[in-house]
Amino acid sequence: MYKLQIQTSFAAAHCLINYQGDCENLHGHNWKVEVAVTARELDSAGLGIDFKILKSETSSLLKTLDHKYLNELPPFLEKSPSSENIACYLYKQLSERLNNGNVTVESVTVWESDVACATYYE
């Protein structure tokens, strides 16, 4: 097995639902996103997946979140846009786009600050 990872980022505003504290108020983050995939085999070029594809699919998905108020977006209308829920959403969306029998999304980690992150994996 091979494990490949990329890092990227997006900026957005949110407020946590059913939370008692400052984060229930509107605020924003510059989130860092780490995507890890595994590949069973390498292609004829020696790649599990072209980083260009991994970056492109992730970037395309993050554009739907970037510089938005997350609470108003369909994935978060009924659930709090916490780092945990954002990581889960990105994992499921990227799995639909990338999983193909050889490549499987392993995990997505969302950092809301330099010292705090949440990872989703199955």
Image (cartoon, rainbow, N blue to C red):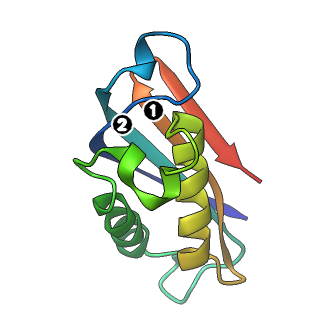
Image coordinates of residue 107 in percent, x first then y, are: 63, 51
Q: Is residue 28 visible?
A: yes
Image coordinates of residue 84 in percent, x first then y, are: 59, 38
Front-most of residues 68 and 11: 68
Q: Is residue 114 left or right of residue 92?
A: left
Q: Is residue 4 visible?
A: no
Distance in Å between CA atoms under marks 1 and 2: 5 Å
Name which residue lies at 40% across and 75% down. 53
59 vs 33: above or below? below
**Residue holding disc 2:** 31
83 vs 40: above or below? above
Quadrant of residue 41 in the image? bottom right
Three-letter amino acid code at the position of disc 2: Trp
Identify the image quadrant of the C terminus. bottom right
Q: Secondary structure at mark 1?
A: strand
**Residue holding disc 1:** 111
